[in-house]
Image (cartoon, rainbow, N blue to C red):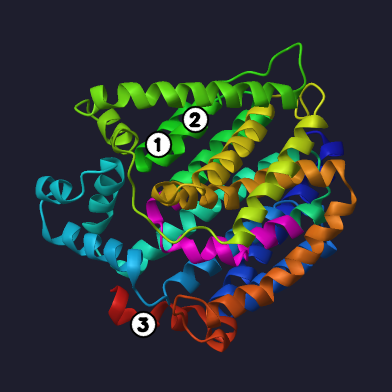
Amino acid sequence: MDMANSPKLALTVHNGQARAALWVIVGLGFMLQPFLTLVLASLLVWRHPAARGGLSGVLVLGALYLSLVNITKLPESDLAVYLESFEYAQLLDLGPFLLLNTREPLYYVSMYGLANMPGIDGRIYVFLSTLLPYLLFGTAVLRVGGALRLERRSLLSLLLFLLFFGQLFSLSAHLFRQFLAASLAMLFLADQAVTGRRRWGLGLLGTMIHYSSMPLMLLSLLQPLRRYSGVLSVLFHMVMLMVIYALALQVAPLLLDVPVLGLMFQRIASGEGAELDPLTLPALVTAALFLVISLYSLARTSGSALGAQDWSLLLCTVTVCVIVLVSSAQPTLSEIAIRYFFYLYFLIGLVLPFLMVRVPLSRWAVHGLALLSVPLFFYKLAYGEWTFAPVSSLIFEPMWMLWGHLSSNLS
């Protein structure tokens, strides 16, 4: 061995051992005080932003903590329905179980496999159903932010804001299928923006888990018009999508008996849907504001900001904003408006890095949002529509006590 390389090798081994020891300490700390360990890890990464694996470590700790919080949730509404399906999966054979759950069978096949593994109960199901989507979504955000060379402290603040974004978290144990499908769609769009390649495995997996993610996959196929700006290209494609939708209204009745397609076109053919409470004015203002931000980012995009097809990401965002605003005007489409407004919560994480790179002042705004999001998160847990463990327990109790909270409801 070259003696000149020995000090370098020894330093590398030493650094590796130090990182491993640090992760052991962090793991033990997380077991004793999950939330406080997450806070300390975030402060450490803020102090040493160049530390290798720091942002990924905060993401893992944050996803683990949110998963623990969700298993303290009192089962009601959609969560109670999913837990009931989970219990049926443990009692029935696969065939009868799928007859009870005919929509998006891939998700329910996965649920059946998980439910019949030894030692698996409702707590583990809820825990994994929270952990996996947050890891996928956070990875997508870090990938886009890293490709844009966003300053790491800004990226840390963005990540913390999204982890403690109460509106998104409140739906994480409510819309399990769409939450997972949306996170897969975000990773699909992020990979395309960063590498220019479409990982169709991710896209198809998300679509088969929840059909609402299919339009995002289809939009990724569209290309900007070479002779026109990004904004004009988007407007042109929006008009084309309206034409396609009008044609779909005409052909939908002919496709009702086609497997898979029939389920997607049934709503179009009937023109009816579940009439839910309409989106509030602040939600509509948020969608309109996000539409303006996306169009601004498109206007500032010359060529390709990432060296790949980031235009598709912004096109998807503009399209989802338009879907939300237009469908909100018709009561029978309120379910569509609400479902796609949910996608905006995810798209915020992929579009804000563009704004933060192009408008430096927005980075300070994200720092402020990160600081505000934590107290607002706990306020929403305490006074929101769902019932969780007391805030004092969520902040100070060790991992095993959070795991055992309301265990009779989830086991």
Residue sitting farthest toward the right? 361
Q: Residue at x 49, y 44 (%)?
A: 327
Query: Where's residue 81, x and y in %?
Result: 27, 64
Q: How far separated are the C-alphas under marks 2 and 1?
A: 8 Å
Does 79 sit left or right of 179 as displayed? left
Q: Are marks 2 and 1 in contact (CB under 8 Å)?
A: yes
Q: Nearer the viewer, mark 3 or mark 2?
A: 2
Sequence-first tag of 2 and 1: 1
Residue sitting farthest toward the front? 330
Q: Are marks 1 and 3 in contact (CB under 8 Å)?
A: no
Q: How far separated are the C-alphas under marks 3 and 2?
A: 39 Å
Query: Where's residue 351, x and y in %?
Result: 70, 43
**Residue at the spot of label 1:** 207
Sequence-first tag of 1 and 3: 1
**Residue at the spot of label 3:** 406
**Residue at the spot of label 2:** 217
Q: Is residue 29 visible?
A: no
Amino acid identity at mark 1: Thr
Quadrant of residue 74 in the image? Answer: bottom left
Residue 404 disc label:
none
